[in-house]
Image (spheres, helix red, strand yellow):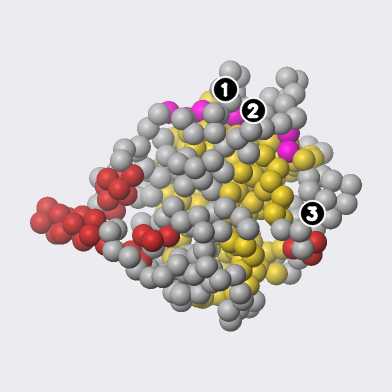
Amino acid sequence: MIHSSWRLAVLAAVLSTVACGDIELSCEPEGDEIPICGVQMPEDLAALPDAGGILVAEYGDGGKLPGALSWFQPFTGNGFTRLVDSDNIMVGASTADNWGEAGCAVPDLLSPHGIYLSPRGDTQQLLVVNHSAVEQVLFYDVLAAPDNTAPPSLAWRGCVTFPGDAVLNDVVALPDGGFAVTHMYQRQHELLAQLGSMLGLNKGHVWRWSPGAGIHVMANTVARMPNGIEVAPDGKSIWVNNYLEQELRQYDVATEQLLQTVQVPNIDNSAWLGDGRLLLASHLSPLTMFPCFGLTQGSCGAGYELIAVDTETGVTESIFRAERGGPFGPATVAIEYQGKLYAGSFSGDRMAELRR
């Protein structure tokens, strides 16, 4: 057991130093992929209601780079509009409206990861996983524009800070005004943490935060590299994508009991489709993705697949697949917007419209 684990660690370390393909700089459509360039690492996406556009988390490579929260409306042809970056993190702040924890320190850097948009009273709430000197979840109020050709405004509504060894990924809102957020692994050197996660030596879990009660680790959620997370439309259960476990798990929010498991390989983020199925972004070959990390220009073109899951039956269906070498990839998320599929990636300078 020790011998085979050592060989796996050495293999992974060697592969991390090998270039696995050319970077695609062209922004021309190819096949069913239509790249949309001019954005930094669009790791996560959220569709605004009433055809109000798409909110984009411009990833900062886990806090190594400054990122932004941006807006994209496909039919305007105006590209991406940055709404918040490190220079205006507290835009629109109000001392009367704090949705987070009292005394939470404003981050010194905006470097987003997962985002989640949901109704809150008569407005929309945006949750943002942020990497800076500390790991936090940020709250923003999303104020709609007069019409859907103009970007919304974001207003700061507080934050929640996590322990120093946390490495957060994705977040969802819960009915009590709180949220659940995935914690991939304990903080250490990035390569060591990922190797430890592969070997089962450095596991993650799901944190839950509730107003007035603070944070706790949700029971039964320990796994190797929890990644994306989604909440059921009724708010009673959450779905967690455990990347290295090759599975999707459903948990009851009230009891924190495991309800079911569906086998799906290498799953990143997820989003609900209009037909009620859960759409997962899956990576075809994670060990070919090393050139993608930290890439800010072009596309590494790593292969990916979008898999729809019937959460009642566990039946899965592949609805889009892209092999290596295209003008976009790998997808970390895909959402439906105005009858079309749009995908984002943790790598490169583009998102994509996908024809199916």
Q: Quadrant of the C terminus?
A: bottom right
Gap in angstroms between the C-alphas marked 2 and 1 = 7 Å
Q: Which disc is residue 104 wearing?
A: 1
Neighbourhood count class around disc 3 (C-alpha, 10 Å): few under 14, some 14–19, many 20 upward: many
Q: Is residue 250 visible?
A: no
| Residue 213 versus residue 310 in the image, above or below | above
Residue toward you, 298 or 6 = 298
Look at mark 2 in the image and give the residue it sits on: 158
Q: Quadrant of residue 171?
A: top right
Residue in the image at 88% along x and 51% along y: 147
The amino acid marked with disc number 2 is Gly
Residue placed under numbered mark 3 in the picture: 52
Is the C-beta separation of discs 2 and 1 under 8 Å? yes
User: Can you see residue 144?
Assistant: yes
Percent of width and height locating residue 294: 44, 52
Quadrant into which the N terminus falls: bottom left
- Which residue is located at x 15 percent, y 59 percent? 7
**Category of crowding for the residue at label 1, using alpha-carbon neighbours closer than 10 angstroms: few (below 14), some (14–19), many (at least 20):** some
Q: Is 299 in the magenta?
A: no
Q: Residue at x 74, y 69 (%)?
A: 339
**Where 312 sits versus 167, above or below?**
below
| Residue 66 badge | none
In the shown orientation, is residue 196 left or right of residue 340? left
**Is 28 rendered above or below residue 39?**
below
Q: Position of residue 175 (x, y in %)?
A: 66, 39
Q: Earlier in the sequence, mark 3 or mark 1?
A: 3
SS of the residue at dot 2? Answer: strand
Amino acid at circle 3: Gly
Question: Magenta residues?
Answer: 154-163
